[in-house]
Image (spheres, helix red, strand yellow):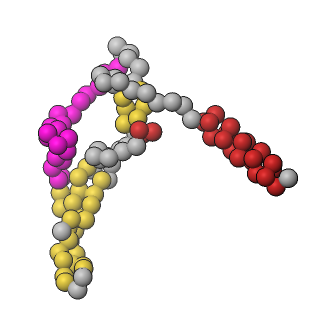
Amino acid sequence: MVRDRMQASQSRQKAYADGRRRPLEFVAGDHVFLRLANLHPVFHVSQLRKYVFDPAHVLEAEDIQIREDLAVEVPPIALEESRVEERRGKPVNLVKVIWDRRTNDSTWES
């Protein structure tokens, strides 16, 4: 009886999850949108959306240089603040680097 209820519950959950999923298949040459605000070298395929061609779309592409190792070099916009943290018993100087003001993308770098 418990096993039957467990099976029924798992079946309901699977049906709910499968109903929300949609298969994503892309081939080389497909155009896609990336839902992340920041460029990142690693992202999940669920962050991609297929682009349907429309001649009315006008896209302004930024000139992004991609290296052979598929890394993107993004120059910093500004250095905002600095601080000293202790790591493994040693002081480390950190600066807050602003990468993009539109998305407020910033990181603390040593």
Q: Is residue 58 magenta?
A: yes
Q: Residue at x 43, y 27 (%)?
A: 25
Q: Is residue 3 magenta?
A: no
Q: Residue at x 41, y 20 (%)?
A: 52
Residue at the outermost right position: 1
Quarter of the image with the C terminus is bottom left
Q: Is 31 displayed left or right of 68 in the figure?
A: right
In the depicted structure, whether residue 51 falls above or below residue 107: above
Quarter occupied by residue 86: bottom left
In terms of depth relative to the viewer, which is nearer, 64 or 28? 28
Magenta stretch: give its range.
57-77
In terms of depth relative to the viewer, which is nearer, 4 or 67? 4
Is any part of residue 27 visible from this angle? yes
- Residue 32 position, x and y percent, is 36, 29
Magenta segment, prevailing SS (helix, strand or loop): loop
Is any part of residue 102 visible from this angle? no
Quarter occupied by residue 29: top left
Q: Residue at x 15, y 49 (%)?
A: 75
In terms of depth relative to the viewer, which is nearer, 104 or 93? 93
In the depicted structure, whether residue 17 falls above or below residue 33: below
